[in-house]
């Protein structure tokens, strides 16, 4: 048995090579699978239940894939729809799909796999000992879980398989693991389990496992002993190096990958170049676990944020930027507590020095002197009004604060007027845990929609 999976791109919204996509359709795939999101861009999208991608781009690319699906006569599946996979994002994707279906004039059967979780039920599961922390998980309480605006469970291959068994033309899945949408059909058709999961990991980001990674489109053939990776765009080639290296991508261990129901072990995998384009992989193993678990992701409100930006160009201040910033933070924090009556733990105030140590802070090891430094003041407070007020207290410091009392008063540059930019409600991740399930579908729901 061989299963051919066509992967148009690493994520819907990042574009794909239409010429390469047509090559894939001509090769007669068994399924078209594409990812819709991740947590890469932070907690706000999950917290708000929205997509990071523009609706116009999503609709244009999805319309092309829906047309390709009709041409190929195979299922089209998207995982983690709408970036975060929450129910509101899934509904957003479903609305776009309905709109395109009406414009294309084709009847469709759509299966919707929902991954959103009820906060009260998850809190009860936590109290019952059904939820366990992963490494470096934050300490949580039942109240913290209930404070999450959105919680999702990451579906695996079993849940995608259940959606495929409905016979749907299109599957819109909530939060899934990146690999599940690719591994599901090969596993359903009894392909080698280790190969199914390993090939899915290699293909999760499209052509990122090949040269010309922005080209997007790849094809993976699965069978009873391994899998073969073939990039389809002009100038895109896979090699044992590019394919094996992808196990390092977003993975703490380059040999082990945990998924619902077990883990993938690629310690014994062998990578062989078939030709200048394709790579064959064999020797991967799937190790089932005794208990079935799914990962939980949750985001909760973390206050309101105001941001200010200024520029330091005077060589004296550029050279002593860290000392200058530390002095401003000390003085401004004291003023906030004195004049606004806030406690030290009621708000957060930081200055990040772009060009100096904005990315790594105290871990920075490079010491080349910059010409100028951008200063970002980041304020987080319980209310939008408080964040705005603290921003106004910080404003004069970023404009005129001298390094020492004896110096002439400097003037720095604001990028905008007013310099305070209000981000509104911000969110933080609150869960990095797994939920034990007695049945893989226990935390998931499937709906079927027929569009005439």
Image (tube, rainbow, N blue to C red):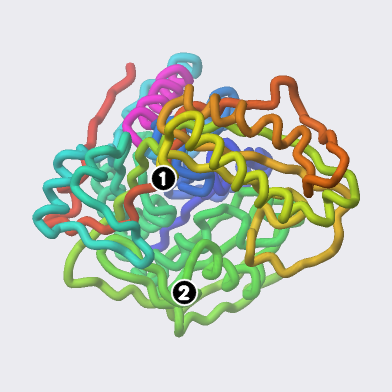
**Which is more N-terminal, label 1 or label 2?**
2
Q: Are marks 2 and 1 in contact (CB under 8 Å)?
A: no
100 in relation to 284, above or below = above
Q: Quadrant of the N terminus?
A: bottom left
Q: Residue at x 63, y 41 (%)?
A: 16
Residue occupied by mark 1: 345
In the rendering, at what x and y percent does residue 189 appear? Answer: 31, 59
Is residue 187 something one can see in this rendering? yes
Residue 112 numbered tag: none
Compared across the picture, whether 369 is left or right of 78 comes to right
Q: Nearer the viewer, residue 409 or 115?
A: 409
Residue at point 54%, 25% (across, down): 389
Label 2 belongs to which residue? 253
Is residue 346 positioned above or below 250 on the image? above
Secondary structure at numbered mark 2: loop
Residue 171 in view in this figure? no
Task: Please identify, in this view, whether the residue under mark 2 or under mark 1 is nearer the observer.
Answer: 1
Give SS at disc 1: loop
Furthest-bottom residue in this view = 268
Say if the magenta span includes residue 260.
no
Residue located 56% across and 48% down the image: 10
Q: Say left or right for 354 vs 25.
A: right
Q: Which residues are magenta?
A: 86-101
Q: CA distance from mark 2 to mark 1?
A: 37 Å
Residue 378: percent from left, percent from top: 59, 39
Q: Residue at x 85, y 45 (%)?
A: 407
């Amino acid at each position: 048995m061989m299963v051919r999976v066509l992967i148009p791109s690493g994520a819907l919204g990042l574009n794909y090579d239409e010429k390469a996509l047509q090559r894939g359709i001509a090769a007669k795939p068994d399924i078209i699978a594409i990812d819709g999101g991740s947590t890469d861009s932070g907690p706000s999208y999950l917290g708000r239940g929205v997509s990071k991608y523009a609706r116009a781009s999503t609709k244009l690319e999805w319309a092309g894939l829906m047309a390709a699906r009709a041409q190929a006569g195979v299922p089209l599946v998207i995982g983690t729809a709408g970036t975060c996979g929450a129910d509101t994002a899934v509904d957003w994707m479903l609305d776009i799909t309905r709109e395109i279906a009406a414009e294309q004039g084709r009847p469709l059967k759509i299966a919707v796999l929902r991954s959103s979780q009820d906060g009260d039920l998850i809190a009860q599961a936590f109290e019952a000992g059904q939820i366990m922390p992963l490494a470096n998980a934050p300490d949580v309480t039942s109240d913290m879980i209930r404070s999450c605006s959105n919680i999702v469970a990451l579906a695996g291959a079993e849940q995608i398989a259940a959606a495929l068994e409905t016979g749907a033309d299109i599957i819109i899945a909530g939060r899934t693991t990146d690999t599940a949408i690719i591994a599901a059909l090969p596993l359903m058709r009894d392909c080698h389990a280790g190969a199914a999961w390993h090939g899915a990991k290699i293909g999760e980001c499209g052509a990122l496992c090949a040269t010309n990674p922005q080209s997007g489109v790849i094809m993976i053939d699965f069978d009873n002993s391994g899998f073969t990776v073939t990039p389809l765009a002009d100038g895109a080639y896979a090699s044992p190096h590019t394919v094996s290296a992808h196990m390092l991508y977003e993975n703490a261990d380059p040999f082990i990958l945990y998924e619902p129901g077990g883990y993938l072990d690629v310690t014994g995998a062998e990578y062989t170049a078939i030709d200048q384009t394709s790579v064959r992989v064999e020797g991967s193993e799937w190790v089932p676990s005794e208990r079935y678990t799914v990962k939980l992701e949750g985001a909760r409100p973390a206050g309101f944020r105001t941001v200010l930006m200024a520029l330091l160009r005077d060589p004296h201040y550029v050279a002593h930027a860290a000392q200058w910033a530390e002095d401003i933070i000390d003085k401004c924090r004291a003023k906030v507590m004195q004049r606004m009556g806030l406690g030290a733990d009621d708000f957060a105030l930081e200055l990040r020095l772009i060009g100096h140590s904005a990315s790594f802070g105290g871990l920075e090891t490079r010491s080349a002197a910059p010409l100028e430094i951008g200063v970002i003041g980041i304020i987080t407070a319980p209310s939008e009004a408080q964040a705005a007020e603290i921003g106004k207290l910080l404003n004069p410091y970023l404009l005129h604060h001298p390094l020492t009392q004896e110096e002439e008063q400097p003037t720095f540059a604001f990028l905008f007027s007013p310099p305070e930019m209000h981000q509104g409600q911000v969110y933080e991740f609150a869960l990095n845990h797994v939920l034990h399930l007695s049945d893989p579908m226990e935390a998931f729901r499937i709906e079927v929609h027929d569009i005439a």
